[in-house]
Image (cartoon, rainbow, N blue to C red):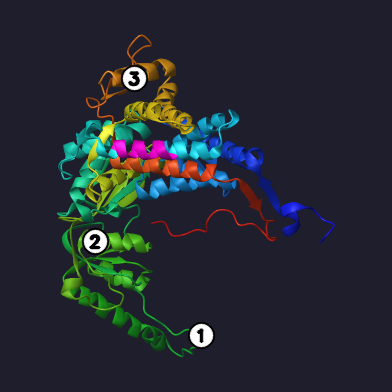
Amino acid sequence: MFKGPVGIQSLLKDGTQSYAGVDEALLKNMEASKYVSEITRTSLGPCGTNKLIVNHINKHFVTSDTATMLKELDIYHPAAKLVVMAVQAQEQECGDATNLVSILIGELLENAEQLLKQGIHASDIIRGYEMAGDRVVKYLNDNDDLVAYTLGDVKSVDQISTAIKSVLGAKQYGLEDTLTRLVASACCSVMPEDPKKFDIDNIRVAKLPGCGNIHNSYVVEGMVTTRDTMGIEKHKKNCKVAVYGCGLEMTGTETQGTVLLESGKQLMDFAKGEEKKMEEFVQSLVDAGVEAVIVGGAIQDIALHFLNKHHILAIKCTSKFEMRRLCRTLGATGIVRLGAPLPDELGYAESIDVEEISSAKVTVVRAADSKVSTIVLRGATANFLDEVERAIDDAVNVVRCCAVKGQRQFVVGGGGCEISLGLDVAKFGQECSGLEQYAVLKFAESLEVVANIIAENAGLNAMDAVTTLKAAHASGQTKMCVDVDAPNRRASPICDAVSKSILDNRGIKSWAIRLAIDTVLTILRIQHIIVAKQAGGPQTKGTPYVDED
């Protein structure tokens, strides 16, 4: 004990690692966090590139979605995990602008590192970043001159299309018009009278890879299940539907027994009681006017026989989440007993049809005033459809922020809003005194990274684009942004964001900037790292399998 290591190592168990100081702890943490930002920065904007990720269970992901990338990378470094946690928090809270969080963290840390190497203390940098952060959030939230568009009616397809076009264009460039129409129609069809009760779970996506392209996609006011019905009935119109959470099978004892049959009559009578009970149950469905049943468990052959006999359509649904959505679609109540349904437990469907799409059979359940809407996506590969689904999820989350949180104001996208914020922070920095001024000015410089990366990923001259954009905003043209559609290098690299619907939700952007600032300040305050020795035994990777929602 008294002859071992000195200092803090003498207090810890063997194998514990300790790092302290600016060089060993702070700069190493900043370097690790910047690596995370470098991974995602090339995926920003409409011309961003995809990443091919193979996770620990050999599942392939081709994506430009930051939250998906960082989730599947299984990052180990504790400081880099702070960036991942910030991105996940942004994904859960807003569902969009995750890459903005990652990139802004990396750029703020890059500029903070330069100040540290110039001899400015970390405490001065922290105070400067706090001052600049408070200034930029207040300016973004309170200055109505930044507002480029306000969503008035969340039930208007045209207004929602304007609000979400930029979100979809950033993920699926060139397909934004088609996807915008689909998402806007789906959201408006399920928007309740009170928009604050809007639930994103009511917007479903059915992916059907194979023959066809994304332009063949369409919206169904109801549910689409990617499976066939169980019996011979494939089509029903204007029918009553019973939803059973249990299976259509007779219960039996858990013990096993032996039966001695001495004649053919005994063999014929052996299962007659079970058949009689099942026939009585199916007859009770017929008497109640039921023409279709949805079952959450197994369907016995004898039950299927009587269902076919009475021309009752049967759908087997193994997912409890899908059962709940079907109940919402049909207005039915799930029944957990094997018996005749009550009148108020039945649902109603306008039509239930089995359709064959790309050699795959799907069951389409349509209902009047359905609370669930399904976007049927067509495409060549499963990876492409997965990426389109992630883009749709981001767009639906923007609609949720507008409807539920009341964040209906939009600012200029394409790096334009960040340039305006940077100019205001730079003006504020000139008025500051003390060493904090350097940090405030570096903060203003960091905000230019968004426009810089968007132009760089589009193949434009990034320096020329940022310089032109700053000059335009300084002269009062605050609705300008980077133009990734610039036809040639001689054309202007900026354009009017409002005319092209290049917009970002103000509440989402404000939340992303706050998360980035808080994460950077947390990393800058870390001066000591202590890592205990890993426990023995096999290490589990990732999360266990759970039923997909």
* Left or right placement of residue 286 versus residue 204 in this view: left
- Crowd band around label 3 with a 10 angstrom C-alpha radius: few (<14), some (14–19), many (20+): many
Q: Mark 1 points at which residue?
A: 256
Q: Position of residue 521 (x, y in %)?
A: 49, 43
**Residue, x 43% and y 17% (percent of image)?**
463
Residue 328's disc number: 2
Farthest-out residue, top: 490
Query: Residue flagged by tag 3: what amino acid is it?
Result: Leu
* Left or right placement of residue 529 versus residue 251 in this view: right
**Residue, x 35% and y 54% (percent of image)?**
227
Residue 122, by quadrant, is: top right
Q: From which residue to which does the magenta span run?
A: 130-140
Is 138 in the magenta? yes
- Crowd band around label 2 with a 10 angstrom C-alpha radius: few (<14), some (14–19), many (20+): some
For marks 1 and 3, give the CA distance.
80 Å
Which numbered disc flags the more N-terminal residue, 1 or 2? 1
Q: Mark 3 points at which residue?
A: 469
